[in-house]
Amino acid sequence: MAAIVSLKGVEKDYPLGKTVVRAVKGVDLVIEPGEFTVIAGPSGSGKTTLLNLIGCIDVATRGEVVVDGARTDTLSDNALTALRLRTLGFIFQSFNLINVLDLVQNVEFPLLLQGGFSKAERDARVREMVEKVGLTAQIRQRPNELSGGQRQRVAIARALVTRPKIVLADEPTANLDSATGTAIIDLMRDLNQTSGTTFIFSTHDGKVMDRAGRVVRILDGRLERDERRGA
């Protein structure tokens, strides 16, 4: 089976005044379709940078990043945008919902950006995802009328409504209480198992790591350990 994500010798530098900070240092990583993988490490370890490189939000300074068969450093801006829209779904710790839109409109938004769907198709996809995350009763509420856990469920529905091959989640439980965070991770694990979607998280939350099939540990920009748990 071909890898859905492949990193070879990846490095990422950021200028800081007159110096250069290397946030990622020579990372090699292969992720297969359908994996439920955590990139774990303390704050400043490089895990979010690594997620941004996989998500085509950033470009490696050196090395090769391949996502769904496409080497990202060879793609035009338009091709990168298309890859983000059609292959990737994003879940952010700050939710990034649009406050003036209600729940349904927030979930529908990526479909409008992607284009090519009739209203009936959009309605069916949105309804399916809203039901899966258990928010049918809240469909006309706006983000400021929802709890933190409910907003994160909206963010999950929005990430999955385009049926992406890969979902990237950056510290998805950081702003949630323990019980809600556990419920959110269990929901994503269930969606992973039923849909075969590849999930990649960045986190230092032990509860997320406990539910992962694989934990890739990063420290000071380097991969320290790769643990496969077979679950």
Image: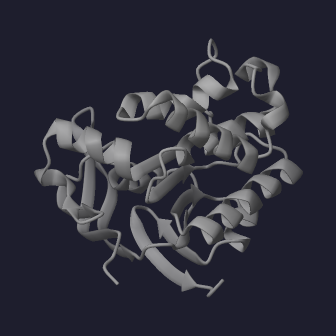
Would you place residue 32 above or below residue 155 in this image? below
Q: Which percent across, then down, holds residue 25?
A: 30, 64
Q: Quadrant of the N terminus?
A: bottom left
Expressed as whole percent of the image width and height from the top left, the position of residue 139 reads 75, 27
Q: Residue at x 25, y 62 (%)?
A: 65
Between 60 and 128, the one nearer to me in the picture:
128
Q: Residue at x 49, y 52 (%)?
A: 163
Q: Left or right: 204 with respect to 27?
A: right
Q: Is residue 10 above or below residue 111?
A: below
Instruction: Please report the residue visible at 50 percent of the width from the left and 55 percent of the height from the top.
Output: 167
Q: Is residue 2 above or below residue 138?
A: below
**For this rendering, which residue is in front, 132 or 217?**
132
- Quarter of the image containing the C terminus? bottom right
Residue 171, position as x, y percentages in the image: 61, 49
Residue 224 seen in render:
yes
- Residue 137 spot, x, y in % from top left: 85, 32
Residue furthest to the top in view is 100
161 vs 57, left or right, is right
